[in-house]
Amino acid sequence: MKNNKNKFNKTINPSGNELPLSWWKFKKNRYITINHPAITAKEKCAFKVETILSPQENQTLEGLTRTLQTSKRDAVRIAIYELGKDVFKAENFLKYADKKTKEKGHTSRSFELPIRVIKEEKEIAQKIAKQFEISEKEVVRLCIIWLGKKTHEIDFRMTKCKREGQEKLAREWSKEYDGSGSKLNKLNKASHAAYELAEEQAQIEKQEREDASKRMQWMAGAGKYRLTGEFESDLNSFILLENMEEEERMEKELEQILEDENIKSKREQDIRRAMFYFPFMEREDAEEYVKEKAEELVKEAEEEQWLENASDEELIDKDWWQFFFYRCNYHCDPIWTNDKDWEEQSNRKENETATEYEARAFPPEYVKEFEERKKKEQEKRMKNLEVAKKQKKLRKKRDLVNDLKDEVERWSKEIEELNAKNLKGKTDKELEKHQESLKWAEDALSIQKKRLIDSNYLDLYWDDLS
């Protein structure tokens, strides 16, 4: 057998001993998000956005919380912030977020998700909604789907965030390991064989991507899949679609299992679901997972009930942010937010009513000034957005013109080479073939020149002038 010493074969060093971390097979995708602007923002999350998710979309969000190592709320906030930097990056995902979509994995939505965000994030969501002419619920769904996909791309960069090294993740796992030895022993026994297969697996993944590319091109040719012209983006979206179809197949398979085994208990269904989608989970882990989820729901229900029954004054005394969030409809912070003594000012005074407290926090002149400033900022953002859209259109036009120029140059060169050929001594059949090639090249050149001067080049010229 050929002894391939390559980058994948790192299980054994020259001395015959195992290399550090050679036992680590749980490769994870984790980001360090503590410095992300959404996390470091000091502003209180006083604005509400909400959406409804399908089971697969909810799984995407749960996966995102693990990847970003945050709560669901902060995961959504990060997603909104990142997409807000360039909304056009998510154009290919709009069909999945659509409330009327028929795309597999995005139907049967029943998971309601209310999220509290800061003012800037609320405004970003509104901007995206206006740009794509979709609802706020569709915006939040779009952000989750988009970031859930992007975080698994190797070249994706998130604002002020780094990916955690596998060494650190391995060390953390090792500290928490219970020392029983059984699972680790099995892992060590499989270690050498696993690394010997790594290169082969990499080749398989490469081949699968090439096969997916062929399927995508075939479906595009058959009119069953729309291409945008950006190959990598199109292929990633196509693979995402296939994965979603696989998720829907798995969901149907799970439903069939539950039906065949006549499992009626909601708790047991949830446990089996966790074990089905996370095969590494033992039953004990799945039970703990379901228990934690149930406790979260109970806690949320109790909080919602208290909020519904509490008086305005009680709500202010407990959490004045919640008072402004649930009971008022302001789109700015209280006037004292940036003052040094804001904590003292935020406390309700003795015998102060909720109406008096509200008036003190939001004087009419302060609210009016904010609304005027907000309107100007919105107009400026829309103007910048229009400029960005125009620049994007111009870039596409330039790319098209450059492609057409390249085609004109290629066919001109082809004609030049054909005319330069020495045809002396050629047979009639060879001469006929030569003339056919020349005619083909001349026709192709004529078509490309016509395309170039027809409208594209003139459009580009006038765009440049404007």
Image (tube, rainbow, N blue to C red):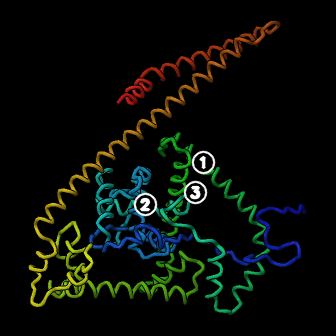
Question: Relative to 366, is 85 above or below?
Answer: above
Measuring 60% from the left and 79% from the top, which residue is drawn there? Answer: 280
* Crowdedness near tag 1: few (<14), some (14–19) or many (≥20) residues, C-alpha within 10 Å: some
Callout 3 amino acid = Asp
> The N terminus is located in which quarter?
bottom right
> Which circle marks residue 213 in the picture?
1
Q: Position of residue 12 (x, y in %)?
A: 83, 73
304 or 222: which is nearer to us?
304
Measuring 16% from the left and 60% from the top, which residue is drawn there? Answer: 369
Disc 3 or disc 1, which is closer to the eye? 3
- CB contact under 8 Å: marks 3 and 2: no
Q: Which secondary structure lies at badge 3?
A: loop
Measuring 20% from the left and 75% from the top, which residue is drawn there? Answer: 324
> Which circle marks residue 155 in the picture?
3
Residue at the spot of label 2: 82
Toward the right, the furthest residue is 1
Callout 1 amino acid = Ser
Callout 2 amino acid = Glu
130 or 134: which is nearer to us?
130
Question: Relative to 302, is 327 above or below?
Answer: above
Residue 462 is left or right of residue 213, and the answer is left
